[in-house]
Image: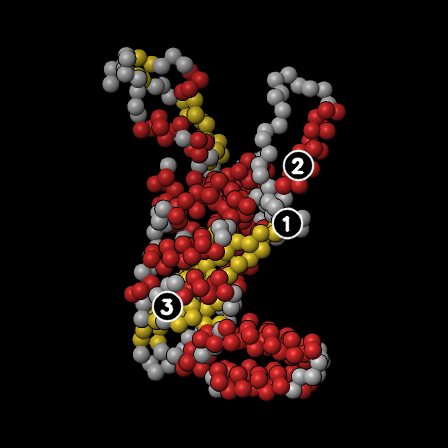
Amino acid sequence: MSGKPKANKGRSLRSSLSINGRIEVRRKRWYGEGEGSDCPLDRLLDEAQATISVGVRELCCRLGIAGGSFARSAENLKRAAMLSMAEEKLRAVVESEGKAVQAASRDEQLELDWSAAQCKTLTPAGEQVSRIYVSADGVMVPMTTAAEKMKRRGTVLKKRREKPRKRGRTGLPAVKTGSDQRYKQVYVTAFYDQEQDHRLVSVTRRDHRGLGKLLKRDGARLRIRAADERVGLVDGAVCLRNHLEGLPLTAVGLDFYHLGEHVHAGRRQTFGEESEEGKQWASHALHTVRHEGYEPFWKKLTDWRGCQQGRAQRQSADGLLHYVAQRREMLDYEEFEKRGWHIGSGPIEAMCKATTRRLKGPGMRWDADHAEAMMALESLYQSNLWDGYWTTTVYRRI
């Protein structure tokens, strides 16, 4: 294109923070009279996120989700890569990238290298089948409340009033809406194979309807219908069970550990905390449901209920009977073990801990969207999609 150099020198300088240090690019721009200019390189250099390279952003995210605080992550960044970045800048980079991960997942830009049909395993009879597990759980995350935000704002305003007003200062920005509770629930979902070599972990701070949409979306991405066996495992919460049953599953099971917790709670209320008789009863009851089935287990519970004399003991027994009766179809452990299926939801419990580890440090409080973004980054790592995201999805976005 014919033309002349652009006169504004300030716009010809671009600075980018890379893994090898800060890089400055000086170049002339050309434009046609009455037409302006349109150069792909100019658009790339003008991207706001291009001021920090992909390599630096990845390193910030690695340190951000692994460190105990953003301040410590900034120190580690300087020590490890000789890159200086303010704590708040690093926080902004990490949280914005977490939101970008959520958007990429929502738009199905994260490329999976496996599907449900590829989750091959052997049955106890030696037959090869494709099997995939589905699980979900809710985890409580510490939030910054609206009252805490207003209190902080009042402290900042007081400090500003005590200092001479600087020229050009226009006051504080608008307050971001805080949470109405100290802790809010975030849902974690996981699809995985028998050996957990393949895993897809996702999070959402939406309500149970958002959880249902997330499960259906990830199930469709993995083409779950193509698997020979599709097994759901949950802790027994009604909303979790309902949404799992909305998927095309072969069976839905109640996590055996959670059933055991309810049985032992009933045992403590009726026999006493340290009663050996009670411990033996609970152990035998759990052995019965696991190896003999629901009907013998139910009879053992009703016999136990009939022996209770006190009102509190009867109420406790009734609570356990009600809990078990509501989940009758989920207690077929004999069939689960016969087919080689898991009876515990340990993998989803582990993912709940992994995705919230960074959020639950001493004194930590989060905005809901930032907490979800941090969990999304950890979910990306736990799903073995980290490298693919940084080498493919990020460049496509830029």
- The numbered mark, 1 or 2, whose residue comes first in the sequence reads 2
- The numbered mark, 1 or 3, whose residue comes first in the sequence reads 1
- Give the numbered dot on residue 182: 1
Q: Amino acid at mark 1?
A: Arg
List x then y, in percent, for residue 333: 46, 79
List x then y, in percent, for residue 280: 63, 86
Q: Secondary structure at mark 1?
A: loop
Disc 2: CA contacts within 10 A as few (<14), some (14-19) or many (>=20) = some
Residue lying at 43% horizontally and 51% vertically, measured from the top left: 386
Furthest toward the right, the residue is 162
Q: Is residue 70 visible?
A: no
- Give the numbered dot on residue 302: none
Q: Secondary structure at mark 3?
A: loop
Residues under labels 1 and 3: Cα distance?
Answer: 36 Å
Above or below residue 367? Residue 265 is below
Disc 1: CA contacts within 10 A as few (<14), some (14-19) or many (>=20) = some
Residues under labels 1 and 2: Cα distance?
Answer: 14 Å
Q: Amino acid at mark 2?
A: Met
Badge 2 vs badge 3, beta-carbon distance below 8 Å: no
Above or below residue 208? Residue 16 is above
Identify the image quadrant of the N terminus: top left
- Give the numbered dot on residue 150: 2
Residue lying at 27% horizontally and 16% vertically, measured from the top left: 35
Q: Amino acid at mark 3?
A: Leu
Residue at numbered disc 3: 249
Badge 1 vs badge 2, beta-carbon distance below 8 Å: no
Identify the image quadrant of the C terminus: top left
Residue lying at 39% horizontally and 72% vertically, measured from the top left: 251
List x then y, in percent, for residue 334: 44, 82
